[in-house]
Image (tube, rainbow, N blue to C red):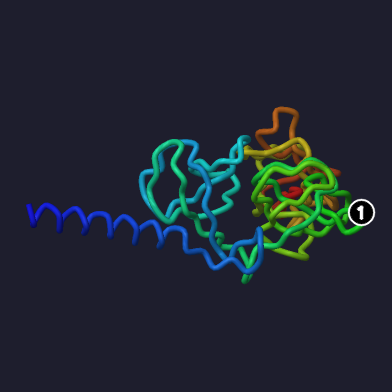
Amino acid sequence: MKINILNTVGILFASVKKSAQMNAFANIAEGTHAGQITMTAAEQIISPNLLVKADSQGCVKIANAGEKPIAVTQDSAENGDILAVYLPGCASSTVLCVAASSIQNGDTVYGSVAGKVTSTPVAGAYKIGIALNDASPSCIVEVDPQGFGSRACEVISCGLYDWIGTTNTNSLTLDNLKETDAVIATLSSTTSSEKNVSAKINATQDGIDFTLDSAGGASTKVSWIILRKS
């Protein structure tokens, strides 16, 4: 009986200790977090150290290639469990901002009118960070200040294209493009009289269409870059 009592006390102590470790966050101020936060797992997460993304319900799921991660897991979790995650892009603390428009957990937010933040930036807007909760207009949103003060644009892909054939049009196949992506292209070398090149995302959004002002050839090379509002 004595051994069973000691075992029970030991188990209870270990549970309390683990709970304290998981929830001992060094919050800088009310409603903010210092480099980590607890969120609800929307699916089974099999191990720590995995990238997670936000879902539409304010929970987290595993982030795959091409999906924007917002945190890194500290532990494994079952669907519906509370999960501790690291905020790798966070400064010494998250920040609280006022929403200018409806914002969802995981949205990238930018500066807006009257010092507020929005997930729908205007041209030239500056990035503030990643939203960590849903927020209605004029309500408070907690923000992980990733890339604070940077421009609202990211490089999706870039490269050097070798021209095929002797026509004035060529296409390059690429994945995960959007109709609103911006393509910039320039001639790195020419074959004969071509002087200019234009580029655009094609109608099916699976590549770039290049057009020269005259027929290209074996020595024609095009440098290109794809930019996207982040």
Q: Which residue is mark 1?
A: 113
Q: Position of residue 192 (x, y in %)?
A: 79, 52
Depth check, front residue: 158 or 215: 158
Depth check, front residue: 33 or 14: 14
Which residue is pictured at 56% across the width and 60% down the height?
87
Q: Position of residue 167 (x, y in %)?
A: 75, 37
Depth check, front residue: 164 or 77: 77
SS at badge 1: helix
Quarter residue 149 falls in: bottom right
Quarter residue 203 falls in: top right
Which residue is pictured at 71% across the width and 54% down the height?
154
**Does residue 13 appear to the left or right of 163 in the view shown?**
left
- Mark 1: give few (<14), some (14-19) or many (20+) Cα within 10 Å: few
Which residue is pictured at 39% across the width and 53% down the height?
75
Q: Position of residue 179 (x, y in %)?
A: 76, 35
Instruction: Report the label total.
Output: 1
**Does residue 43 appear to the left or right of 213 in the view shown?**
left
Q: Can residue 41 be seen?
A: yes
